[in-house]
Image (cartoon, helix red, strand yellow):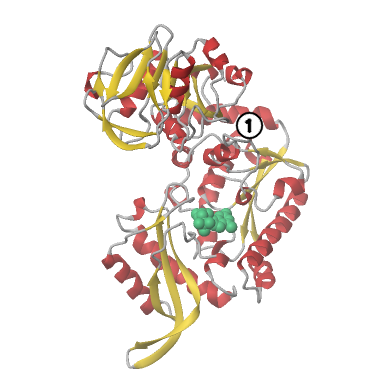
């Protein structure tokens, strides 16, 4: 983290765009934190912010339980920018009028500058902005200047004496043509941020923080081979070296050659890794099991047992490293009811509770792409930083039905072809995940002069921002044709390939 006085506080009133505000400010080299709107003023002051943004939100200011403006923030005399709902709260507080509407204005609008503005420069005049609101400000408070209108709607208000600003539109949404410039004006010219935050500067401060936190204790880390745990472990290793022991388990459910490749990559980075080969353990427990949730539980329990055994070997480990990211943290401090639930797949099946370890989460303030940049800066190879997300239970949930050696070999071989072909194409960057799923059915085919009766593989490729929703990818037909042709001719035991055209919702990304 940068110096404390280089922080922007974003108070979250529940808008779907709040995370985007944080994204944009980070892209401008300005560190920001998102806090629930109800955060007390002492906590806000602890961040020593240089400015405050009030986000949009789904409520009407007139609703009975609508989130309120904490007027204590005005007492900080910091520059404040209210966006959409945030603007309406400010307008109401300072004596303006907010009018409830029966319909929402949603989509593009163009704005017209109506007065001189510290926030909006000339180029924004006539430009497109993104609107998403029900209520609107129908009368500006006395001390405020209306600096822009969109049709009859007040679009921007400012009181430069008090450094208080409001926008009806969403500058954080990329459809607002000059949105980033508007945010930059507020942050750089009004709040006076120095734009010195970079993912690189994060490494130094975080390294020091971990050293102070951990002292001489031992630290344990469960590596999955994925980006998050690898970057977290590498950062901790930079801070405390071999005081950290990483455990990397070969469940037998990883992708083709993955265990050796990842282990090799870890070796090159100099991580202190204890490899555990446990394929037989996992497969014997999974024999005969077809229910997806039972598979997950068996795998989770086996992980805990192995981890427990390894932790005992290390002795007196006091800390557990986890690769929790910012989107998980934001979700868990949601606007209407903070909770500290960590997503179950982030703690490998409940490890912290069971083992009484304190958590180190060095990435909890970063977004995935920032983590990738930090990984690259720490020297991690692309093979790790650019990996697609891979589920903890591994291929077990991509083999529909019983998991056994034969099924693993089939899905691994098909998946390797999908990865090779999609990975080598120019659509790869637009995809969140792409993989093969082995189905428990056989179909009739004809190869050469002979009849075949073999297994079916489904190809899944999706685009997504965060895995919560996803669109099936419109892969070029030629690419699908190549994948299908290669799988059927190269993977003996598969004679048919289908393509999954279900989005999430209603489907999920994984089949189980
Ligand atoms: P679904 O299938 O729920 O997946 O749409 C959303 C994202 O989560 C991953 N996923 C998992 N990750 N343990 C994990 O660590 C799991 O049990 C699990 N199930 C799904 C999935 O790969 C996708 O990125």
Which residue does the numbered mark 1 point to in the structure image?
A: 210
Could you tell me which residue is drawn at 50 percent across and 27 percent down? 62
Res. 151 in view: yes
Query: Within 8 Å: ligand 1 and the Cβ of disc 1?
Result: no
Q: Which quarter of the rendering shows the C terminus?
A: bottom right
Q: Is residue 472 above or below residue 459?
A: above
Q: How many numbered discs sit on the rendered protein?
A: 1
Q: Position of residue 298 (x, y in %)?
A: 68, 64
Name above or below for residue 507 compared with residue 64: below
Q: Quadrant location of residue 318?
A: top right
x, y (%) of residue 282?
66, 67
* Residue located at (38% from left, 65% from top): 501
Q: Is residue 129 left or right of residue 373?
A: left
Q: Nearer the viewer, residue 380 or 242?
A: 380
Dot 1: few (<14), some (14–19), or many (≥20) neighbours within 10 Å?
some
User: In the rendered view, would you say 355 is above or below 115?
Assistant: below
Residue lying at the far top in this picture: please name it: 161
Indicate the quadrant of ligand 1 in the picture.
bottom right
What is the x, y in percent for residue 341? 65, 43
Asked whether residue 189 is in view, the answer is: no
Side of 295 relative to 443 (left or right): right
Tag 1, which secondary structure? helix
Residue plotted at (49% across, 13% down): 78
User: Residue 221 location, x and y as percent?
Assistant: 64, 46
Work out whether residue 278 or residue 304 is closer to the camera in this orientation and state it. 304
Q: Residue at x 27, y 12 (%)?
A: 116
The image shows residue 412, relative to residue 14, as above or below, that is below
């Amino acid at each position: 983290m940068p110096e404390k006085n280089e922080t922007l506080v974003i108070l979250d009133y529940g808008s779907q765009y709040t995370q985007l505000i944080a994204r944009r400010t980070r892209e401008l080299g300005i560190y920001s934190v998102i806090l629930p709107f109800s955060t007390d003023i002492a906590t806000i002051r602890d961040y020593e912010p240089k400015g405050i943004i009030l986000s949009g939100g789904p409520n009407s200011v007139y609703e009975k339980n609508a989130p309120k403006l904490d007027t204590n923030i005005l007492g900080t005399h910091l520059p404040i920018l209210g966006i959409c709902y945030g603007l309406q709260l400010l307008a109401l507080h300072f004596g303006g009028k907010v009018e409830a509407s029966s319909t929402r204005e949603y989509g593009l609008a163009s704005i017209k500058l109506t007065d001189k503005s510290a926030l909006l420069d000339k180029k924004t005049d006539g430009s497109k902005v993104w609107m998403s609101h029900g209520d609107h400000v129908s009368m500006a408070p006395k001390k405020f200047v209306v600096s822009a209108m969109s049709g009859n709607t007040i679009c921007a208000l400012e009181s430069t004496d008090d450094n208080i600003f409001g926008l009806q539109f969403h500058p954080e949404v990329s459809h607002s043509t000059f949105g980033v410039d508007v945010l930059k004006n507020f942050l750089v010219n009004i709040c006076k941020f120095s734009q010195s935050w970079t993912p690189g500067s994060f490494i130094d401060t975080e390294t020091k923080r971990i050293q102070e936190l951990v002292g001489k204790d031992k630290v344990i880390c469960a590596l999955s081979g994925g980006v998050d745990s690898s970057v977290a472990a590498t950062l901790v290793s930079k801070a405390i070296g071999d005081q950290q022991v990483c455990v990397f388990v070969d469940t037998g459910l990883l992708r083709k050659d993955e265990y050796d490749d990842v282990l090799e990559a870890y070796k090159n980075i100099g991580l202190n890794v204890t490899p555990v080969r446990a394929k037989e353990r996992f497969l014997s427990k999974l024999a005969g099991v077809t229910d997806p949730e039972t598979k997950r539980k068996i795998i989770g329990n086996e992980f805990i047992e192995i981890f427990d055994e390894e932790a005992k070997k290390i002795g007196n480990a006091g800390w557990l490293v986890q690769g929790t990211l910012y989107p998980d943290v934001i979700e868990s401090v949601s606007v209407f009811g903070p909770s500290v639930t960590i997503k179950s797949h982030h703690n490998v099946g409940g490890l912290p509770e069971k083992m009484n370890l304190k958590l180190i989460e060095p990435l909890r303030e970063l977004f995935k792409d920032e983590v990738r940049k930090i990984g690259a800066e720490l020297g991690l190879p692309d093979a790790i930083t650019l990996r697609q997300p891979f589920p903890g239970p591994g291929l077990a949930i991509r083999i529909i039905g019983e998991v056994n050696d034969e099924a693993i070999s089939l899905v691994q071989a098909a998946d390797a072809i999908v990865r090779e072909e999609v990975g080598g194409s120019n659509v790869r960057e637009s995809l969140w995940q792409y993989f093969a799923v082995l189905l428990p059915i056989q179909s009739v085919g004809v190869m050469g002069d002979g009849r075949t009766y073999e297994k079916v593989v489904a190809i899944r490729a999706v685009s997504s921002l965060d895995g919560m929703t996803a669109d099936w990818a419109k892969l070029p037909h030629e690419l699908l044709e190549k994948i299908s042709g290669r799988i059927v001719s190269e993977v003996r035991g598969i004679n048919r390939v289908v393509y999954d055209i279900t989005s999430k919702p209603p489907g999920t990304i994984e089949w189980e």
